[in-house]
């Protein structure tokens, strides 16, 4: 039988045991101080999945940057984008195209898909400008100049959000424009001006900003302009519902909003 410990001996043994138990806890605290624990938490915050996001053409450049940032924050997740005019994206959703989330360039298109999506949230806003050739050779100064019959003007088709916004602001100012063509998305309008196939076209400010070496812009006063809103939503047919919801939610975070702002987009009204 082991001899009984004296009171002093029992106190010494208890102190040794307590110290031994505190060592692992201290090690855990050191990991947190180094930031490793926080990084792991951030990386594990969203379910891992290969996501397909249908997005409006005007988001092409900024979403490539945003997607890369999201993948970096969430290792193991891949974000694949399919860009097209919002009306084309809506048709794809109605036809059951396999995708996880949708971002359109207007609330009207999204509202028409209420039975196919989760609750949408506006993640950004945009404005229109007049895109003209480099140096503005035709001396376009405002919307009224677009009615000049000698000016080759290109617009987006009226069923496209940017085309609908264009029609709205021209009708409000009672300006009659006869476009030489009506394009399926904003990038096609911009391309016509870039290539010199049109003298002017109405595009989003952010799209014009991607082609500053080939086009100039004429600002449209706020009182004559329209505000484009970009809602994002998950798709009910997504096979990665949690991962899709995490990405849509991330689009409203400060990190994503900074990327959108740097590309020229404006914050949603509620932010």
Image (tube, rainbow, N blue to C red):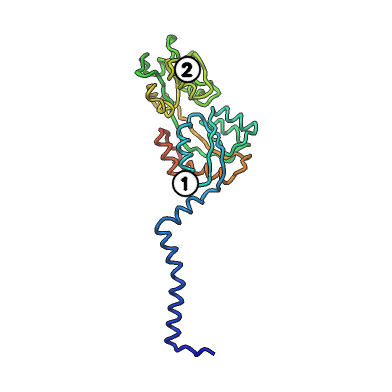
**Residue in the image at 60% along x and 34% along y:** 113
Residue 69 % position (x, y): 45, 42
Q: Residues within 10 Å of mark 1 (few under 14, many from 20)?
A: some
Q: Secondary structure at mark 2?
A: strand
Furthest residue in direction front, as rendered: 1
Residue 1 % position (x, y): 54, 90
Q: Is residue 194 left or right of residue 182?
A: left
- Going from the N terminus, do you reach mark 1 or mark 2 first? 1
Towards the viewer: 60 or 121: 60
Rendering quarter of residue 142: top left
The quadrant of the picture occupied by the C terminus is top left
Residue 147 % position (x, y): 44, 13
Furthest residue in direction right, as rendered: 95
Q: Mark 1 sits on what residue? A: 73
CA separation in Å, label 1 and label 2: 40 Å
Towards the viewer: 50 or 227: 50
Q: Which mark is residue 154?
A: 2
Towards the viewer: 30 or 225: 30
In the figure, 189 relative to 62: above or below? above
Residue 21 % position (x, y): 46, 72
């Amino acid at each position: 039988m082991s001899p009984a410990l004296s009171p002093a001996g029992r106190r010494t043994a208890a102190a040794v045991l307590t110290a031994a138990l505190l060592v692992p806890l201290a090690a855990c605290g050191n990991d947190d101080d180094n930031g490793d624990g926080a990084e792991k938490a951030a990386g594990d915050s969203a379910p891992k999945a290969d996501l397909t996001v249908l997005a409006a053409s005007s988001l092409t450049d900024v979403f490539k940057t945003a997607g890369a940032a999201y993948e970096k924050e969430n290792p193991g997740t891949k974000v694949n984008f399919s860009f097209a005019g919002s009306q084309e994206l809506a048709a794809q959703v109605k036809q059951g195209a396999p995708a996880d989330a949708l971002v359109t360039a207007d609330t009207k298109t999204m509202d028409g898909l209420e039975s196919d999506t989760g609750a949408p949230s506006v993640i950004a806003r945009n404005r229109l400008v007049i895109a003209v050739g480099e140096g503005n050779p035709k001396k376009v100064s405002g919307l009224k100049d677009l009615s000049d019959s000698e000016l080759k003007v290109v617009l987006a088709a009226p069923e496209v959000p940017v085309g609908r916004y264009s029609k709205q602001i021209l009708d409000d100012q009672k300006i009659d424009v006869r476009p030489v063509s009506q394009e399926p998305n904003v990038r096609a309008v911009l391309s016509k001006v870039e290539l010199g196939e049109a003298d002017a076209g109405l595009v989003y400010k952010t799209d014009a900003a991607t082609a500053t070496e080939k086009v100039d812009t004429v600002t449209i006063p706020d009182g004559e302009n329209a505000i484009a809103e970009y809602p994002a939503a998950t798709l009910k047919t997504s096979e990665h519902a949690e991962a899709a919801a995490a990405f849509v939610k991330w689009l409203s975070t400060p990190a994503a909003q900074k990327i959108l702002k740097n590309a020229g987009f404006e914050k949603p009204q509620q932010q």
